[in-house]
Image (spheres, rainbow, N blue to C red):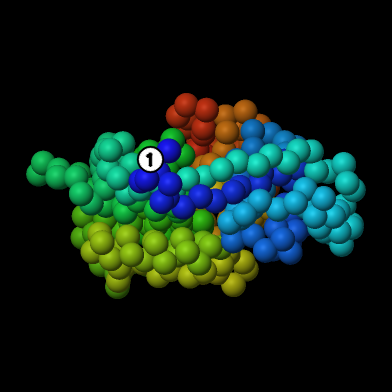
Amino acid sequence: MSSVQSEKKVWHALEISAAAETAEALEFAFNELDSIGTEINHLRRRTNDDVVVIGYFTEKVDASRIDSVVADALTIYKLKPGTVRKKVWSTIVETDWLLEWKQHWKPTFIGNFIVSPPWETLAETTKHVILIEPNMAFGTGTHETTQLCLAAIEKHLKPGFSVLDVGTGTGILSIGAALQLRSHGTSTEQSSILACDADPGSIDIARENAILNNVGKDIEFFVGSINEETPAADLVLANLTIDVILPLLEVLVAKAKRTLIMSGILAEQENEIVTALASRGIDDAEIASSGEWISVAVQMSAADA
């Protein structure tokens, strides 16, 4: 190993595959094991698929201690031992992530939007250019669900509309909406954009990206989710996953005065969201697809008002 490689930091990641209901218990277990961070992969293909909960450590932890702490966590959360399927260790070597991004991330063209890293030089264009700094928050324009949502914003966002962005990530959808409204001559006095995310780090990143795009004053960000007290908006955006969307669907529908746009949904999950909407009297949702993902646009009764 070269001297350069030997100087790089090394972390250890423990991936635990388990039933979805164990995610919170495993996060608790990783905290008890003094992990330096945790991550949950919620992007499951089917509702009953397992999740993968990852804990990061500076040193590997003894297997017997892991088993003991995980067993205690399952007991506390009243879960059965069989809900944990597999534990796998991996090693992560420090990487110059910014250099990696610069080498591989190029501008993405989506209808009347261009999503670009700030170091790229773009030719003069009449399109809406969204500048996004590379980071760990979801939403750089390269994922099909983000592209589907931006295409839906271009189609459904009208002058003067208010916007509610649930699960904003990097803020990319709110920024796109702000740029489109500004191009329509809509001022912040005429409209409003409210964006939220449960992750405080994502909100920090979203605010920075909004400032980078000169729309920092156009968007109000907050940490958390939506509830009955959240103001309604003409256009509601929810680029989440179906596991998050379904429990929120009632309030999402209630808060959308004109149009509700949802994505983060796999094509094979279309029947789940269509059935959930039908149970609420909505049977005319517009489905768009890209790769293995779909977006769902719902027009509310006020759309023609």
From the image, which quarter does the C terminus lie in? bottom left
The one nearer the camera, 30 or 168, is 30
Report helix, strand or loop for mark 1: loop
Query: Horizontally, is 230 left or right of 87 in the view?
Result: left
Residue labelled with disc 1: 2
The answer to whether one can see residue 70 in this image is no
Determine the image quadrant of residue 227: bottom right
Q: Could you say where residue 17 lies in the image, as x and y percent from the top left?
A: 72, 41
Name which residue lies at 32% across and 60% down: 209
Q: Residue furthest left?
A: 124
Q: Could you say where residue 244 lies in the image, as x and y percent from the top left?
A: 63, 50
Q: Is residue 154 above or below residue 165?
A: above
Query: Horizontally, is 189 left or right of 169 in the view?
Result: left
Q: Could you say where residue 39 lies in the image, as x and y percent from the top left?
A: 60, 52
Determine the image quadrant of residue 44: top right
Query: Horizontally, is 38 left or right of 10 in the view?
Result: right
Name which residue lies at 30% across and 45% down: 99
